Structures are given as structure tokens and as C-alpha cells.
Amino acid sequence: MRPVLLLCVLLSSCAPYADFGLPKPTAGPALKLDWKTQAAPVLVRGDAVDVLNPSVAQWQGQYWNLYSVFDGKVWYTALALSPDGLRWAPQGKVLGLTEAWEGDYIAANGGVVAAGKELLYAYQAGEKGKTVIGIARSSDGRNWKKHAGPVLTQGPRMSWDEVSLGDPYLIEAGGEFYLFYLGEDRARRQRLGVARSKDGVQWTKQRAALLELGGAGDFDENGLGEPAVFSANGKWVMLYTGRDRKEKRAMGYAVSTDGHHWEKQKEPVLRGDQPWNAAVVCDATVLVEGNRARIWFGGGDLPKPDERLNGQIGYAELSAPD
């Protein structure tokens, strides 16, 4: 780790801990958990090595997608706009590595939420294998102001997130922000947790992880990541990515009535069924509209743990029973 990065992390205020849940979920649509997936990707990689990690917000009359691009050396955040969430017009790079504490690997893999007149974007940055989470704000979606340092850093020695943090996903509920994220310990075990904040800068962590690894033979036995949380059927629902021992990735879900205690559901698990996503389905972002949950996700045809998946972005829905 660079000396400057190490100093910044050490000087960053360590997030306090508390036991908390989420506010009571809204009833939401009565969804039938039966995936309907569009066959072709809605955002292709073009000349990039990977295009993954969509994060979609409906704001100012259109859909804004802050997604991640890997150019073979670094990850950066790009923007695409759409009138309907299906036809996307790429707008180019909007967030890259500009601060010393961000290291030289990633300023992407984030989650966006529309907060009144601005967009709030939590993103992953730092050295590969030892990343933290930063926050950026924008009033126009194209020009972003980053907070001066990371807002969420590693936990104390022997904690479940002591080595690395990533995959931030933001929601707003009950007047507060909740940030779901991946944490990694010294054994490189990946689990999912949550923090909360009133302003997007000062965060309080939930002490324990929310979801643990699956058992032997499960689709998520080798790691968890990329949580996406929304309300439906009177409960909180979390879509998440699981990695199996062969590094194939699929998407499962868990439910909760309080946002603190989560129960994994055995089925359905969304797996790739097209050549372009045959090995990887990951990175969900969700918008609930009427009686459906609209889901944008990453997919690839090479089973690798992080990048060079031939990643592209697809679309699926969960809808109410007929």
C-alpha cells in the first residue's frame, strides 16, 4: 500500500458500531419470484475488456446508469442514459482515479441513489485486494465532487471486514441512508454487511455480517458479493451474487422483516442461460416500478473471480402473478 494511502486510511475516522435494522418495509408489489430475463445484453462492452456493475437511478425524467468499465489496467465509472431502461446511450467516463487515497486500481463498482436534487454515489477504491469505500455527489450526473477521503474503511483486527470492503449498494429508508457492502477477512472469506448514515459521510456499521457463505456444493460456497436491497411482499429482499468453487457466479436472494436478520432462500437462483452470460450472473441493481422489480445485472462467459469475464450488462424482471 502507498504511504499516502496508508496514512489517509489511518487518519480516517473509524466507523462506530451499533445493532440496528432497517425501518419497517413498505408493502411493495406482491412479486412472484420467477425471473424473466431478456436474452441479449442491453449494454455491450465494445472495445472494453469488461462492462459490469450497473447502478441505475430514475432521476430528472430519465434513467441514469453509473456502470463500471475495465480497460485492461484500471476500473473507472462511466455513464449511460436511457428513456426506458432498455435502450442505453453511453456518455463516457465520469469518475476515475484522481485522489492519492484511491490507489491505482479502481474508482468504480458503486451504487447510486437519487437524493432530491443530487445523485449520491458510493464507490470502491484503493489498492487491489485492500479496497475501501468513497462517496461522490453530483447535481447534474456528469460532474462529481468526491469526499476528501474514504467514508467506510476496514474493521478492527479479526473482524469480518478487516482486510477489504467493496460492492457498495445504497438505499434511502426512513430518512437515512443504508449502505450494503461486501467485507473480506484475512482468510479471504467474503460476506455481506450494512452501515447507516444521515448524511452519506458519517457511517455506523452493523457489527456482524448479515449473510454468511453457503455450504459445500452451494452456489455461494466460495464467496458472496454485490448485494441489492428493495422491498416487496411486505419484506426486505436482498439479491446477491454467489461464487461457487469453480468461480462460476449466479444470483440468489434473501428476505428479512427487519433488515437485521436475513434468511437465504433456496430458489430461484438466476443463472446465465445465454452464451454471453453462461459463466457469470452478478452485480444486480433494482428499481421497483408498479407491480414489477426491474433488475439490471452483469454477465460474462468466463468464470473468473474479479475481471476479464467478457462482461456485459443484461436485464431481468420479477413481476406480480397474473
Image (cartoon, rainbow, N blue to C red):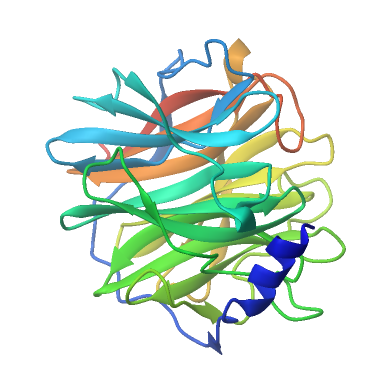
Q: In which quarter of the image is the C terminus?
A: top left
Pick the front one: 259 or 9: 9
Q: Residue placed farthest to the right in the image? A: 187
- Is 190 on the left or on the right of 107, as rendered? right
Would you place residue 258 above or below residue 19 in this image?
above
| Residue 258 seen in the current view | no
Q: In which quarter of the image is residue 11?
A: bottom right
- Residue 108 spot, x, y in % from top left: 53, 43
Pick the front one: 183 or 263: 183
Pick the front one: 227 or 99: 99
Q: Which residue is drawn at 73% across and 72% down?
A: 160
Q: Quadrant of residue 37?
A: top left
Would you place residue 113 above or below residue 150 in this image?
above
Q: Which residue is drawn at 60% across and 35% down?
A: 75
Q: Residue at x 46, y 84 (%)?
A: 20
- Residue 68 spot, x, y in % from top left: 52, 34
Q: Quadrant of the N terminus?
A: bottom right
Would you place residue 305 above or below residue 30 in this image?
above
